[in-house]
Amino acid sequence: MKKLITFAVPCYNSASYMDHCIETLLNAGEDSEIILINDGSKDSTGEIADRYAAEYPDTIRVIHQENGGHGEGVNQGLRNATGLYYKVVDSDDWLDQAALQTVMETLRGFTAMEHPVDLLIANYVYEHSIDQSQKVMRYTNAFPQNQIFSWAETQHFHPSQYLLMHSVIYRTQLLRDCHLELPKHTFYVDNIFVFQPLPYVKTMYYLNVDLYRYFIGREDQSVNERVMITRVDQQLRVTRLMIAAHNLRKIMQEQRKLGRYMVNYLAMMMSISSIFLILADTEESLQKRSELWAYLRSVDPYLCRILKYRSFSAFTNFPGYQGRRLSVSLYRLARRIYKFN
């Protein structure tokens, strides 16, 4: 039976917190399916997933796989999804009940359309466990509300205000049509998920509801600064894949606002990669930073000049030791303001 939406939940050693995530997803009702992907967990994740599937056989399915990383969990969910729409929810995060009901009602409205909307966008909330604070990421300045729109109707995005995996619900077939396949054993692939499909998105709809609750605070979390430094090679891999994914100059010529957004998103990725290579503070890491920019230059020299000297990623390219110190100081300031990790 075809469902309205598929929630894919990649799980790796998630036994201590996955119940909360699953319980919030069950609020979507029988129109939804939940696919729990047990990614080779070494704790009781698989047993918990099987218990839920036995209790809710019409809603929950479990896939047990050898460890392939978060991206392969997303891939596996997409391969098996029966929902018209597809939403990834990390096992340590959760969805707000009232917002979820609004989303489900909106998606039901799309089913009556000859061409259902390609992308539904909702707000997400940073839930910081250390200081118990919250930060809501809204798009009220960037998108029209409660109406179907295209990229041509979008407005200015504020710094740090980008579409993340937390804020998007794609039409499932669109992801399949653009041949989305995330790399295995690689962190930070959520950036590919919200970048590669965008030129295929023709219609969007924005709901100003705080749907996704993004937990921040575990020491082993992939966005923890210390962890990001140790995994910087995976960040570089993702950034290179994004550089190669599209001809951004062509997209800018055909769809100016979409192209500008994607260029700015890539600038953010270049900034993140560069700053964590600086934070690693080794000769090898600084050489990798030079190689990353050289790779971008080899793919598109014009785009490289824009990102290196005219976009906000320029703040990671100040020359010399003092320049690198200034780059780190600006990063620390941005981190305090936006609290993104």
Image (tube, rainbow, N blue to C red):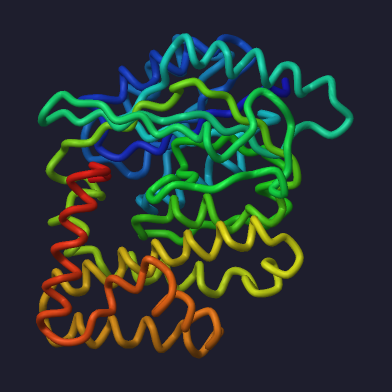
User: Considering the image in quadrants, where does the N terminus appear?
Assistant: top right
Front-most of residues 148 and 1: 148
Q: Is residue 329 left or right of residue 134?
A: left
Residue occupying image coordinates x 15% and y 87%: 320
Residue occupying image coordinates x 45% and y 23%: 211
Front-most of residues 249 and 73: 249
Residue occupying image coordinates x 66% and y 28%: 83
Q: Position of residue 139 (x, y in %)?
A: 50, 35
Front-most of residues 211 and 333: 333
Q: Position of residue 61 (x, y in %)?
A: 51, 25
Up the image or down, 83 lies above or below 305; here it is above
Q: Is residue 14 left or right of residue 211?
A: left
Q: Position of residue 305 (x, y in %)?
A: 47, 83
Residue occupying image coordinates x 70% and y 73%: 250
Number of numbered tags placed on the structure image: 0
Up the image or down, 230 lies above or below 12; here it is below
Q: Quadrant of residue 326?
A: bottom left
Q: Quadrant of residue 276?
A: bottom left
Q: Position of residue 169 (x, y in %)?
A: 58, 34
Up the image or down, 295 lies above or below 221; here it is below
User: Considering the image in quadrants, where does the C terminus appear?
Assistant: top left
Which residue is at the far right? Answer: 114
